Amino acid sequence: MTVVRRNLPHSGIRAVFDRVAEIESSGRAVLNLGIGFPRWDETPPGIIDDVIDAVQKDDFNYIANRGLLELRAAISDDTVKRIGRRFDPETELVVTHGLVEGLAVCSLAFLGAGDEVIVHYPAWDHYTAVAELAGATPVPLNLKHADDFLIDPDHLASLITPRTKMLLLNSPNNPTGAVQPAETLKAIAGLSEKHGFLVLADDIYHEFVYHQEHVSIASFMKDSPLLLYANGFSKSYSMAGWRIGYVASAAPNSDALNRIHQYVVGCGTTFAHTGAAGLLRHPQRQGYIDRMRQVFAGRQTLWTSALAECDGVQLVRNSGAIYLFPRIEFQGMTGREFCYFMLEEHQVAMIPGDEFGAEYGRHVRISFGSDGATQQRAANIISEVLS
Ligand code: PLP
């Protein structure tokens, strides 16, 4: 007999990709606006050389559970520059198999039955799963389109109870693109300190902030043991397939994380860690990041202009990530119906809004992560359909 301990749902985002694969295997091309990956065909040559070098040296041994020390040291220096906090590479950093693993080990290490986790919705589907994985209860903080999907700290405060163990915070945000203002982040940091709950700050889109500076809540939590600072290489450096994320936190928390990580993943891939360390260590290799940000800012403008011309579309112009989350009125369809209509009839793939929270059934998520030609063609088709 199989005993299912946690009956987590299959990801509806993956269900769209499965259908895309079926359509493509029948010979029809799909314009994919579903993928949450900023595609950028330019890996700095130095990184590849470092990886090839490591491979040619037969550098295939296991590394420390926490990840290659050289990479942890480079990440530690990087966080000093970006968020003003140094994490000890020996005791305060765990490099994970992408941030997907990082979020899951945070759940298993810190949450349990009876704990409440505040999740601001719309949220990436992993967030609900992260709370439920360890048997905790997600408490929804439903953000409104009318408020530009920004958090009201008083609303957040009203949800705090003695059981509140953690807040999952994602800015710039998947799926809305919202970037929470500095004063909001400061107020949230104050609530964490007052009530003693952990803040899991997922900054994975930190380089994708347009027309303003990125501010992390981490800069308001200085030496706080309540901060779990989560980030990775998938988005900001366009290195999703390398599977490198990390969680930085005070030593006792980091030790708790590492204990779970050692049984789930063991350690990362030696030569991938070598390449990532080389990227952080050589600022001249990071020039592509600014070019990438400019191109993605242009794509965001392309979409906001195209959608502004369409009937039945309400769009908040947010300033970050690689997503738009419009509300769409089209022939009485829900967002889910509209997505599948566009996929089946026009071969344009988007993600239904209700994948990010039940309240958002009229929305769809558009990713502008794929190449520019795909974006332009898809924008033309959607404009034609909606006009
Ligand atoms: N956090 C957010 C908000 C994401 O959107 C994603 C990926 O889509 C991740 C974390 C995890 O990324 P990865 O496992 O590739 O590091």
Image (tube, rainbow, N blue to C red):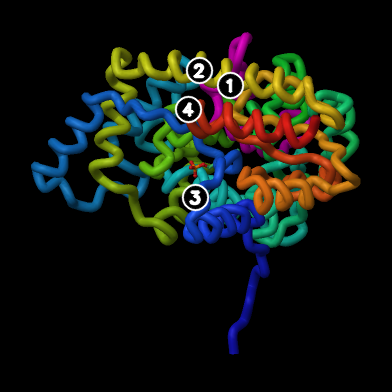
Q: Which residue is mark 2?
A: 295
Q: Earlier in the sequence, mark 1 or mark 4?
A: 4
Q: Amino acid at mark 4?
A: Ser
Q: Is residue 310 left or right of residue 275?
A: right
Q: For numbered disc 1, what is the local secondary structure?
A: helix
Bounds of the magenta span?
193-219
Foreground label between 1 and 4: 1
Q: State how far apart marks 2 and 4 are (Cα).
A: 13 Å
Residue denoted by label 4: 236
Q: CA distance from mark 3 to mark 4?
A: 17 Å
In this rendering, the label closer to the viewer, 3 or 4: 4
Q: Are marks 2 and 3 in contact (CB under 8 Å)?
A: no
In front here: 43 or 347? Answer: 347
Separation of residues labelled 1 and 2 (CA atoms): 6 Å
Q: Which residue is mark 1?
A: 299
Residue 164 x/y as whole percent:
78, 45
> Where in the figure is residue 141, as x and y percent of width and height?
83, 39
Q: How far from the left and from the top, in percent, is residue 59?
A: 15, 46
- Circles 1 and 2: CB atoms closer than 8 Å: yes
Q: Earlier in the sequence, mark 3 or mark 4?
A: 3
Q: Which residue lies at the image location 56% right of the left edge and 52% below the top edge?
A: 104
The CA span between labels 2 and 3 is 29 Å
Give the labeled residue for mark 3: 101
| Three-letter amino acid code of the residue under disc 2 | Val
